[in-house]
Amino acid sequence: MSYQRNSSEMGTHPELVEMRERLERTASSGPAIAVEGLILLAGVYAAISPWVVHFAGQANITVNNLIVGITVGLIGLGLALAPERMLRVAWVIAPLGIWLLIAPWVVTVAHSARAGIIWNNVWLGAVTAVLGLAAVGLTVGVNRRARR
């Protein structure tokens, strides 16, 4: 199904070329590449952490970390491969990090987990949330600097 496009859409914006160039410069900067790589690594670690930390007998938190880790890893991979399209999705990483942080108390059956699981998820969630905020902050900071 195709929709009619109005002439008032973003495609006819007079500064579209400048905005795309600014986004491309931001996405290819050194800090952006570092943040993208760290997000990918955080996602991979979140996915494998149930087997690294031995979440034995905790099926719910194991599945939770696997799904959230794969999601964060795929967003990180997307940021690395197609940053011009994925920067709009970077904000999702911060809430996923917060979810990882609180998951040991929410997802486990008795609403309590072993100390290793809690420490793992608290640190991993905090790092992931900070990386998500850094990914969002890179684009916000560049947009603000360009307006001055």
Image (cartoon, helix red, strand yellow):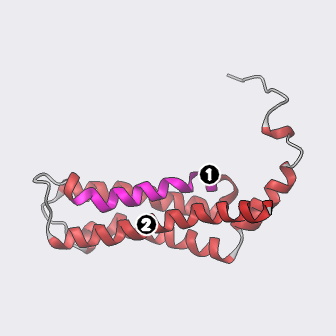
| Mark 2 element type | helix
- Quick one: 95 or 61, which is closer to the camera? 95
Q: Position of residue 148 (x, y in %)?
A: 80, 63
Residue type marked 2:
Thr
Q: Judge whether residue 100 is colored magenta.
A: yes
Q: Residues within 10 Å of mark 2 (few under 14, many from 20)?
A: many
Q: Residue at x 23, y 73 (%)?
A: 53
Q: Which residues are magenta?
A: 87-104
Q: Is residue 76 left or right of residue 68?
A: right
Residue sitting farthest toward the front: 148
Residue type marked 1:
Arg
Q: Determine the image quadrant of residue 86.
A: bottom right
Q: Which mark is residue 88?
A: 1
Q: Judge whether residue 88 is colored magenta.
A: yes
Q: Magenta: predominant secondary structure element? A: helix
How many circles with numbers are drawn on the protein? Answer: 2
Q: Determine the image quadrant of residue 20.
A: bottom right
The residue that disc 2 covers is 128
* Whole-number angstrom distance, CA of label 1 to CA of label 2: 17 Å
N-terminal-most mark, 1 or 2? 1
- Quick one: 40 or 106, which is closer to the camera? 106
Q: Residue at x 59, y 76 (%)?
A: 34
Q: Residue at x 89, y 45 (%)?
A: 14
Q: Position of residue 114 (x, y in %)?
A: 14, 68
